Amino acid sequence: MLRIEWGQTARGTVRMSGAKNAALPVLASALFARRSTLHNIPHIGDVMMLLRIFESYGVTVRFEGNTVELDTSDMRPESDDPGLVKKIRASILLIPALLHRFGRVDLPYPGGCNLGKRPIDEHVNGLRMLGYGFSESDGLLSFSGDWFRHDVELSTFFSVTATENLLAASAFRPGTTKIRLAAIEPHVMDVVGFLRACGARIETSYDHSFEVSGISELPEHVEYTVIHDYLESGFFILLGALCAEEFIDIEHARIGDLGSFLIKASEAGVCYELRSNDTIRVHNSRSNLRAISLQTNVFPGFPTDIQSPFTVMLTQAEGISRVHEILFEGRFNMLMELEAMKGHSAILNPHEALIFGPTKLRGTTVTSWDLRSGASMILAGLIAEGETRITNVEYIERGYEDILGKLRSLGIQIDRIES
Ligand code: EPU
């Protein structure tokens, strides 16, 4: 578990890592190539697990620094450790490459963060539209068959991983695929960048659609650099607003991807300056914070993945904030932990909550319900009076590279202790 003492302040500069949500689908799409070299891959639990899963399918993996090299020459259609697949949601991203190479995939229903309902109907519908057969029994998903050769039009209803999966499945299928109502999150666009580097032609439109002209030859070798993590930079912006001694600088912040987040942060009183080289300077804004109304949405709306830390900040804002989480009802589990810390909130229904502020948080033992709520507990611990202990740290380590090292580089000491 983590132990945090309150009253610490942050100063200096922190540099963002490669994006988890881009690294996972790009790695999975790289299984179409015989060999690949991928840069800026973060050392995080989800990536390490995906690479173990790759190895269980016979893929040769080298991970040095932040570069992953994959060789799929000896890849097999079945994993020699299917239990691994259940551990992360991202294993669903293996389906297109396995189907393409072997004409069949049997995959246990993928696991992942505890965020409530996580349906996969858009993946299944899309793959069926591309020609594959599907059946499910005893929690095992089975896809089989060959792709259609004619042009196809399908929709992914803004699902991030379904859009990524169907982009990958379309990129190596002869014929044109029109993907409507597509997600366009920065990590989805990074998958588009990767598939273009493989030779696929993908056109994007203003109306959330992609037109993919597939290539029939699988790439021999592809090299690509994954984008930095705008969700991680959102977390550090909030940390700066709450705990900076005066200000902190965040490098590789992906400022261009943070539009709606920065508008809401400004509205809540967060003071920041945009500097050159994609750096953002965030000033301590604690005494200036005011209540706002916030609704998560698909990109370019406010990201669900920064809602939890933002909600922690709103406990320090003057007035009553309203948070509307349209995607994942499980995200409000975190409010029970804030309540244990003497935060004051009211859950109106599974998707809406009121946060009353400012409240003086008090340290206690809290848990991580998921990756983002776990990281948010770090923010809460830094502003709560006394000592805070956070359990289920593995969730945080699934998605934040060397978070303790980054915090230490800002002068914040958090210890990892035995439970
Ligand atoms: N949905 C469906 N049917 C589907 C798929 C999704 O109804 O077939 C619904 C979901 O129930 C949800 C909404 O669509 O309400 C969005 O789900 P989506 O499929 O977009 O989520 P995801 O692809 O499973 C990715 C990220 C999540 C992030 C969401 C939303 C990755 C590996 N995961 O999940 O990241 O919260 O998109 O942006 O990219 C995180 O990083 O902490 C995390 C959970």
Image (spheres, grey):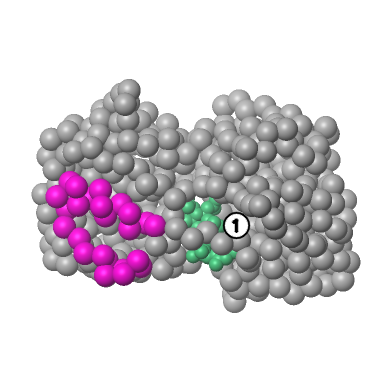
- Which residue appears farthest toward the bottom when viewing the image? 207
Q: Which of 30 and 345 is in front in this view?
A: 345
Judge whether 88 appears above or below 311 on screen.
above
Element at badge 1? helix
Q: The N terminus is located in which quarter?
A: top left
Q: Which residue is the site of mark 1?
A: 161
**Quadrant of the rendered structure where residue 30 is?**
top right
Q: How many labels does the image show?
A: 1
Is the residue indicated by label 1 positioned so its CB lies within 8 Å of ligand 1?
yes
Q: Which amino acid does label 1 sit on?
A: Thr
**Residue under the image location 83 percent in, 32 percent down:** 74
Q: Residue at 18% across / 43% down in the picture?
A: 383
Q: Residue 346 in magenta?
A: yes
Crowdedness of circle 1 by 10 Å Cα count: few (<14), some, many (20+)?
many
Name the spot of residue 42 as percent of width and height, x first: 53, 36
- The x, y position of residue 380, in whole percent, is 23, 45
Q: Which residue shows up at 86% across the image and 66% down it? A: 148
Q: Which of 22 and 106 is in front in this view?
A: 106
Q: What stretch is highlighted in magenta?
A: 330-353
Frontmost residue, 1 versus 136: 136
Check the image and report above or below for 43 versus 359: above
